[in-house]
Amino acid sequence: MYRILITDEVSNKAIEILKSKKMQVDYQPGISKEELIKIIPNYDAILVRSRTKLFKDVLEKASKLKVIGRVGVGLDNIDVDFAKSRGIKIVTAGEATADSVAELTICLMIALSRKVLIGDELLRRGIWGKSICFGTQLAGKTLGIIGVGRIGSRVARIASAMKMKVFGYDISMDRIKMLQEEGVNISYASLDDLLRNSDIISIHLPLLKSTRGFINKERVEKMKDGVLLINTARMELFDFDAVIWGLETGKIGGLAADTNLKPDHPFVRRLLGFPNVILTPHIGAQTKEGQDRAAIITATEVLKALGLS
C-alpha cells in the first residue's frame, strides 16, 4: 500500500479519490518543516500547495518519494531539478484554477481603473467621494498581456469581449493564433511595442531565474506614462526598486497585485503606502470550484504516476 502525505489545505475531493484506490492518506496541513523532514522518508507521494517548500534539504530525506503533486501550477516552492535528479515525478493541476485567476485579474483591473476601493473606504468614513473616484473605462483601452498561456489567454478572451484592444507577448505564437481563430481581438506584439503602447499591462509569467525581476527599470521607463500594472502571478517578477520608482514618479499610474509576499515584506509595506495600489492576499485560485478541480486533477495525476489509474 502506498502512503501519501498532504501538507497543505486541499479540497476533500483529493482525499476521496486517493482513498478510493486504498491509499493510506495522512492529512497534515500546516505541518512544520522540521516535522516534515522527520516523516517524509515514510511516504511514496506528497501533495502540496504553495505554503510547503520542497527544496533540497527536504527532498534529500525523501528516500521513498516517487511523486510530488502540486495542487496548483507554480513550481517556485519545489526544487524541480533536484527532484528530477532523484527520479521524483512532479504533476500539477494544469488549467484547473485558470478561470479563477483570470477572473481575479479582470476584477483587479476594474477595481483599479474605477477606484472602487477608494470609493468604498470614503463611504465607510462618511465621505461622499464621487468627484474623487473619477476613473477610466476599459472599453477602447489597450491591454498588453505578457505571457499568453492558460491564464493570459483567458484574460484575453474576457478583455476582448469588453471591447478592449489586446496585445499579446509570448515565446510561443500558438495560443495567440488559437485566440485569433476564435475571433478574439488580440495581436502579437514584441515586448518593446507592448510596453510602449499598452494602457494596462497584465503579467502572467512563471517565476524562473530568467523571469525574476522581469519588470525592471528599463522596461518601466518604456511604458506609457500613467500605465496600470496588474500582476496575479508572482511579486518577484517585479524589480522592487523599479516599481517603487515608477509609482513615485507617476510613470505607473496604479498597480494591482495578488501578492504571494506577506504584509511584513519590505516591498509590500512600501506598496501599501500608495493610495493607487491594490493588494490581495494570494487569492487567485481561492475559489471552491477552482480548488475542487485542482484537487481532483492533481490526485488523479498522482495515481497515474504511481501506475494506479
Image (tube, rainbow, N blue to C red):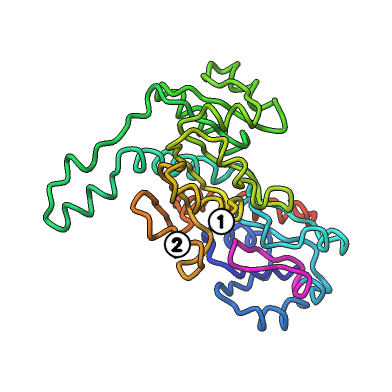
Q: Which of the numbered marks, if any, corresponds to residue 257? A: none
Residue drawn at 48 percent across, 50 percent down: 284
Determine the image quadrant of residue 109.
top left
Q: Is residue 1 left or right of residue 232?
A: right
**Magenta stretch contains residue 84:** no
**Residue under pointer 2:** 270
Q: Identify the amino acid type marked 1.
A: Phe
Q: Are the residues tagged 1 and 2 within 8 Å (C-beta)? A: yes
Residue drawn at 82 percent across, 58 percent down: 81
**Residue under pointer 1:** 240
Disc 1 from disc 2: Cα separation: 10 Å
x, y (%) of residue 57?
77, 75
Q: Secondary structure at mark 1?
A: helix
* Residue nearest the viewer, comparing 170 with 151: 170
Q: Identify the amino acid type marked 2.
A: Arg
x, y (%) of residue 233?
56, 49
* Residue nearest the viewer, comparing 215 with 284: 215
Whichever of labels 1 and 2 marks the residue nearer the N terminus, that label is 1
Range drawn in magenta: 43-58
x, y (%) of residue 286?
46, 54
Q: Local crowd at mark 2 within 10 Å, few (<14), some, or many (≥20)?
A: few
* Residue nearest the viewer, comparing 304 with 182: 182
